[in-house]
Amino acid sequence: MPSNLYDLTLHEAHELLAGRQVSSQELTQAILDRVEQVEPRIKAYVTVTEEIAMQQAREADEAIALGEKNPLAGVPMQLKDNMCTRGVHTTCSSRMLENFVPPYNATVVERLRAGLAVVVGKGNMDEFAMGSSTENSAFFPTHNPWDLERVPGGSSGGPAAAVAAGECIYAIGSDTGGSIRQPAALCGIVGMKPTYGLVSRYGLVAFASSLDQIGPLTKDVTDSALVLSAIAGHDPRDSTSIPQGAKDYTKALTGDIRGLKIGVPKEYYGEGIDPQVADTLRRALEKLEELGASVEETSLPHTRYALAVYYILAPSEASANLARYDGVRYGYSSQEDGSMWEAMERTKQHGFGPEVKRRIMLGTYALSAGYYDAYYLKAQKVRTLISREFQEAFQKYDVLITPTSPTVAFNLGAKVEDPVQMYLNDICTIPVNIAGIPAMSLPAGFVDGLPVGMQIMAKPLAEETMLRVAYAYEKATEWHKMRPEL
């Protein structure tokens, strides 16, 4: 058991709480103290809800005393700041929603609270989830706990950094093109993007509705399975929600992967991938072979079109979704004199940051009358080809394994002026969202003292297989136990 309460995993914290060796109030206070200690250097939170958290901890302690057994009960966690929380600011790290207080909870928040989870606050992110480094936050960049001069990844950089730095026990993020997995890799933790539609998006502030998915960021694979079990399941309020009941994903954690077939798509190990990252992954694959799985090189040739497809589809959906921020009903509103149209223009001019404006313009262009067929329609057709390629691969292999990120964490400011270089950070993660399949990143080693993530992909609704492989690898290695020294 760790010497510091903030270093506990979710399952360790649950055991201590259930055995009455520690109270939720003590654990929550330890996390709040840790936030006070390291937050000035990390900047993982947009909002810290200290009073609410302590009240929720008291309620959890009372319930645990009466026999409450939910593994989330009384454990402090963080929510990415694009999930609606009733009575608590939900900003999406944007000036546009700086003062927005939702009147309702997202479904995922309802499910966490039903399990008596303690919400410590809201995590910093790239504005409206658009970015790979959390430098696009309108408020401040988040710093990587392993090296404060480097980015934590994005867009869920706040949640990933908070988990890695012990500022919460686990966090919930959202993933549109790698926004859970890439920061998890760069911060040395576990991050999962479930199958599209497995976790309700009701109350998630939309970026690209056909790509967005909510998922957990945790310290180990067991915690990932526990949180997924709590938040997954059908929601009639989300029209894309899969009609499937609740499941206990921890049953998949057998540690036995003998006979499983692992495909290694060669396109993910070539150009653009840091050779040291590729070598780290090869050692991880050798470990999986030792554990009884068969590993074989394969090819996904359409992968190279995924980035182009994504940067037509995601901005197009963003252009439609962000049209609602007109300064009339809620959010920032320009109050200068002028016509309604001028006020609307100024609202968007001052309310959105440069990356959000860039993507709205890209999307509006791709959807415009003369270009729709050439860009948007063609991108949808290539999306179908990418999805089919994955379907064919999963007829042969149980999982596919790739690097999560082409490099380790890069320096703050290094890619801000070059959007294309920034976009290339998601080259390994984007195909997963395009196909709607599940994938997760887990720690697989270090390069120059910085974490490297291994990405495991599975066919739709095969989260159990993915977790089984991840758990077996984790049990055979020590990477998940490493903590940054702050």
Image (cartoon, helix red, strand yellow):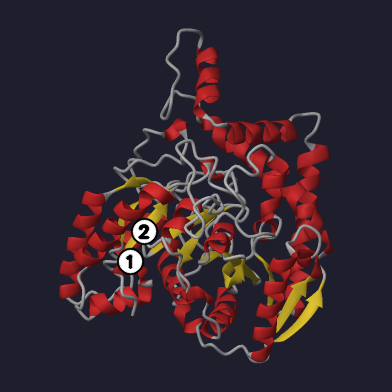
How crowded pointer 1 is (Cα within 10 Å; few <14, some 14-19, many 20+) is rated as many
- CA–CA distance in space, label 2 to label 1: 7 Å
* Mark sitting on residue 369: none
Q: Position of residue 373 (x, y in %)?
A: 81, 38
Q: Amino acid at mark 2?
A: Glu
Asked if marks 2 and 1 touch (Cβ < 8 Å), the reply is: yes
Q: Position of residue 155 (x, y in %)?
A: 54, 49
How crowded pointer 2 is (Cα within 10 Å; few <14, some 14-19, many 20+) is rated as many
Q: Position of residue 46 (x, y in %)?
A: 39, 44
Say which element carries label 1.
helix
Position above or below: 58 against 3: above
Say which element carries label 2.
loop
* Mark sitting on residue 6: 1
Image quarter in which the C terminus is found:
bottom left
Q: Is residue 83 left or right of residue 191?
A: left
Name the foreground residue: 252 vs 178. 178
Image quadrant where residue 2 sits: bottom left
Q: Position of residue 481 (x, y in %)?
A: 46, 75
Residue underneath mark 2: 167
Residue at position x 33%, y 69% in the image: 72
Residue at position x 69%, y 84% in the image: 286
Image quadrant where residue 383 sits: bottom right
Residue at position x 67%, y 54% in the image: 426
- Does residue 44 show up? no
- Does residue 386 show up? yes
Position above or below: 348 against 55: above
Q: Is residue 392 left or right of residue 221?
A: right
